[in-house]
Image: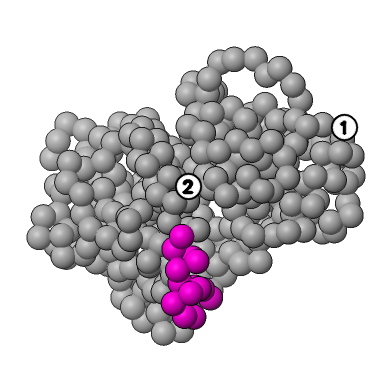
Amino acid sequence: MSEKPIVAYLTRHTVSNYGSVLQAYATQTALEKLGCSPVCINYYRSDEKPKELVHTLLQCSKWNKNALTRLVYMLTQKPVYSYAGKRFEQYRKIVKVTDREYNCEQDLIDDCPEADVYMTGSDQVWNTITCDKIDPVYFMSFLKDGQKRISYAASFGGSEVKDTDKPVISNLLEKYDSVSVRENSGVKIAGELGINASQVLDPTLLLTKDEWEKIIPKRDCSEKYVLVYQLHPNKNFDKYAKAFAKSKGLKLCRISQCFHHIVRSGKFICCPPVEEFLWYIKNAEYFLTDSFHGTAFAIGLNTQFVDILPKSYSERISSILELIGCENRILKSYDDFSITDNRIDFDEVNRKIESERQKSYDTLRNMIGECLE
């Protein structure tokens, strides 16, 4: 065993998405604070690489009808994913990864990185991947019996898993020494599978506001604005954001990693570095989002926010809002521009988060166990 226990963790760090990169960075930072030597297992599925991702997504898309629709999809989507892929390849350098890149389960079976503890990290690692299939690698299927495995803030994504997947998932989770999940719905799912799981904070909330501000650019904000970070197609969201900003007499800004979102309302900020992404959230007067990690950063950086829940996987957002007593920040009507009149009491929210933060650190410390002694 090394002087500092090596924790090799596996998460969805290669997705061209701000939450994916920053939650991996937060996991790394939290483990370092506990006295560990963390390394992210650089697992990058072949079918999720920028050159292949569009082909993979097309297979289960409504555009996969005929040669013409497939051509249109490829011509419009490939440049978008290629551009974001190149930018996020640079952004991911804040995460320490294994020297080797692994592209499939067999790669990891043949050459598993050495570690004292193997950890499934946060994000939707236990949700279905691409075309509605689970990936056993995120359940540590490549490990040998006896190798210590834990999970921290893993997410199933939604409120249930498919019946056909339950036996496979249950068998894989039974091999874990300890299981913790991100949502209260995850605790319920694990229980139905016969697995005891505790609920912990997403790693982005393990870092304090001061810790995040260390990487945020230190420059003044010259104008007030409403910021939108929208991941899911929703024309009503777009119309609401425009009307909301007008009702507040503020400029509307939109941040996205997809350059084709330029057609949506507001000043478009395309694929900025992760530090800039956080700067825009921190300095916004109001923040409108349908993203879990967008919500998490608004909470952590104490920005007044409104959540427009997506049609699927909204449990992720509802769970964290329930934890801090902010369910009233969920928009119920696209005619409601007064939702922010009652401002969030961040003194109270911060007290709740700090209490949960200490519990989560204690859970992570206990799961790593004797390796830290």
Figure quadrant of residue 345: top right
Residue 371 percent location from the top left of the image: 23, 42
Q: Is residue 224 above or below residue 338?
A: above
Q: Which residue is mark 2?
A: 17
* Badge 2 element: loop
Spatial CA span between label 1 and label 2: 30 Å
Q: Residue at x 21, y 33 (%)?
A: 4
Q: Is residue 43 magenta?
A: no
Instruction: Check the image and name the residue furthest to the front.
Output: 68
Figure quadrant of residue 57: bottom left
The magenta span reads: 61-75
* Badge 1 element: loop
Q: Which residue is mark 1?
A: 249
Amino acid type, label 1: Gly
Could you classify mark 2 by the number of other residues whose Cα lies within 10 Å: few (under 14), some (14-19), or many (20 or more)? Answer: many
Q: Residue at x 89, y 54 (%)?
A: 335
